[in-house]
Amino acid sequence: MMEKIAEMKGLTKSFGDLKVLQGVDLDLYKGENLVVLGKSGSGKSVLIKILVGLLKKDEGSVMVMGKEISELKLKELNALRLKIGFSFQNSALYDSMTVRENMEFPLVRNVKNLTRKEIDTKIEGLLDSVGLPQSINQMPSELSGGQKKRIGIARTLILNPQIMLYDEPTAGLDPITCVEINTLITQVREEYNTSSIVITHDLTCAKATGDRVAVLLDGQFKAVGEFSEVFENATDERIKSFYDYNFIQ
């Protein structure tokens, strides 16, 4: 039996009259890359914000690493968040810092008593694993979109998270860079033993990275399974049209 690292049951969330999540059930298993697919505005980002306690749910339960998120005090929640890496859509690098300083920032803030050598070894190792060792002294403004994304992922890994959350990892990137980022997401799982949720509306990304795919429509998961399963067996026209929109023959 596979071990669950996160579990959502009966999750609802509304903003005024707008019902965004309407009874969501989803499990994330240890060592799995789970893709959450949905169009813009379907509630994908709301889902992961609830998962890390940035938004409060209306109803339902959210268990992460055996803890119910809504019951945690702020100190406990912050401790749990350190085990969750969040790769933002825009990479969220500090423009005024070099790549080295960007990488160092979360490490020095959260891990005490590290020597300069330990910090450097950690940073150099991670930059190496995302294929950008040479960029250590560059500023974010000198990097391409794909390079920024890689550095953002490397910085997210610096605290050895158990869960990785990728928010639209291929958004705004050219097709070749998309392939590189998709490969990197798979490599991260192998190398750092992470469990991941990949939020995307890009089916190529979903197919390349996901062990399972969950399609979010009208605030609920309408299909969950392997990529081929979900799209070959789709009876829901909206799921079919989603596929056709991405892969126009």
Image: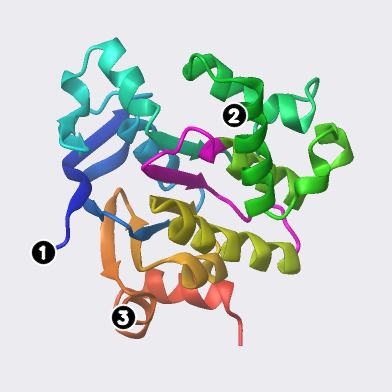
Q: Residue furthest bottom?
A: 249
For residue 18, say whether it is visible: no
Q: Residue at x 19, y 45 (%)?
A: 7
- Do tag 3 and tag 1 residues touch (Cβ < 8 Å)? no
Q: Mark 2 and mark 1: span between their CA atoms?
A: 38 Å
Vertical placement of residue 66 versus 80, above or below: below
Measured as percent of width and height from the top left, residue 49 is found at 39, 32
The residue type indicated by label 2 comes to Glu
Q: Which residue is mark 3?
A: 229
In the structure shown, which secondary structural element does the residue marked by tag 2 occupy? Answer: helix
Q: Which residue is mark 2?
A: 118
Q: Identify the residue under disc 1.
A: 1
Cα–Cα gap, marks 3 and 1:
21 Å
Residue 44 in the figure: left or right of residue 91: left
Magenta stretch: give its range: 156-174
Secondary structure beneath dot 1 equals loop
Label 3 amino acid? Answer: Glu
Q: Secondary structure at mark 3?
A: helix
